[in-house]
Image (cartoon, helix red, strand yellow):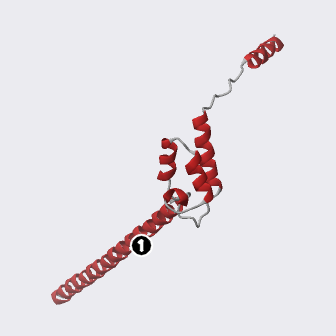
Amino acid sequence: DEVQAIASMMEKQARIVVKPKEVSQEEKQRKAALLAQYANVTDEEEYPFPALLGAQGSEGQQLFETSSNNHTLLALQALFRNTNVEDVLNARKLERELLRDEFQKKKEQDKLQREKDKLAKQERKEKEKKRTQKGERKR
């Protein structure tokens, strides 16, 4: 009974066939352009395709000439350098500044609290002193 259930499951799995996804020529060109772009990008480069932005370069010029699709061209021109690292560093810097400000505020509040406590302690001492003086006068 179990063997038959397993056999039927295996038959069902064998019948399932994944249809290959059909990719248009336009999508292939777009993918190839993106792969070519990111294969040659380094951290020192300001823009992935300097040729598309005005400078002369062989790879960018070839892409510019072979790409007949305006949408792809606009997409490539719209790409700029990756700013994730800068964003993370700026976020950390901002967080440190906020923590520093909070620490400074807390430090000032603690100082004020210590002064208040000191004044309260002094007032208690003075009250105690007056009370003891009254008690001594009565004797």
Which residue is found at the position 48% from the left and 61% from the top?
A: 87
Identify the image quadrant of residue 15.
top right
Q: Is residue 6 left or right of residue 128?
A: right
Identify the image quadrant of residue 28.
top right
Query: Please, what is the three-letter code of the amino acid marked with disc 1?
Result: Arg
Q: Residue furthest front?
A: 65
Q: Is residue 37 left or right of residue 109?
A: right
Identify the image quadrant of residue 1.
top right
Residue 49 placement (x, y as % from top left): 55, 57
Q: Is residue 108 left or right of residue 48?
A: left
Mark 1: give few (<14), some (14-19) or many (20+) Cα within 10 Å.
few
Which residue is found at the position 60% from the left and 32% from the top?
A: 24
Tell me if residue 122 comes above or below residue 37 in the rendering: below
Which residue is found at the position 34% from the left and 73% from the top?
A: 105
Q: Nearer the viewer, residue 81 or 120?
A: 81
Q: Nearer the viewer, residue 92 or 45?
A: 45
Quarter holding the C terminus is: bottom left
Q: Nearer the viewer, residue 21 or 36?
A: 36
Tell me if residue 133 comes above or below residue 49 in the rendering: below
Which residue is found at the position 61% from the left and 34% from the top?
A: 25
Residue 35 placement (x, y as % from top left): 63, 48
Q: Is residue 17 left or right of residue 95?
A: right
Tell me if residue 46 comes above or below residue 12 in the rendering: below
Residue 41 placement (x, y as % from top left): 61, 59
- The residue beneath circle 1 is 100
